[in-house]
Image: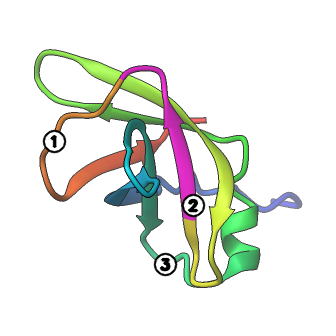
Amino acid sequence: MSEPEEVLQILRGIVVNYRTGPKTQRSKEGIVQFVNVRSNSQAARLLGRKVVWSDSKRKIIGKVVAVHGKNGLVIVRFRRGLPGKTGIYIDVVG
């Protein structure tokens, strides 16, 4: 084989917090930490990727829009608001 086979790696992330202001909380925007993403440069490679949160009844699609800080966190904007559970897991789909 002359061409290396690409391994499809599914990235899983956890919503660590909602994006907040001094008096507001935006339930459509979450701050996400992905597994094995620990630096700003690694997080920058995820910009523009689509993510999905799903449970048994519904799924909510979002997009990585910005890097948050220097430790590999990103800001994801979802089409609908996320539920208020702690530790929501999301997957990168595109």
Q: Residue 80: x percent and y percent?
A: 38, 21
The residue drawn where x is 75% and y is 64% is 44
Residue 53 or residue 3, whichever sits in front: 53
**Could you tell me which quadrant the N terminus lies in?**
bottom right
The residue segment tinted magenta is: 74-80
| Residue 68 relative to residue 83: left or right | right
Alpha-carbon distance for marks 3 and 1? Answer: 25 Å
Return the disc, 1 or 2, that comes first in the chain's sequence: 2
Residue linked to disc 2: 74
Residue 26 or residue 8, whichever sits in front: 26
The residue drawn where x is 13% and y is 15% is 57
**Could you tell me which quadrant the C terminus lies in?**
top right
Residue linked to disc 3: 36
Residue 46 or residue 94, whichever sits in front: 46
Q: Residue 22: x percent and y percent?
A: 43, 57
Circle 3 SS class: loop
The answer to whether 41 is drawn above or below residue 60 in the figure is below
Per the image, is 75 magenta?
yes
Residue linked to disc 1: 84
Return the disc, 3 or 1, that comes first in the chain's sequence: 3
| Residue 56 relative to residue 4: left or right | left
Circle 2 SS class: strand
Alpha-carbon distance for marks 3 and 2? Answer: 13 Å
Per the image, is 8 magenta?
no
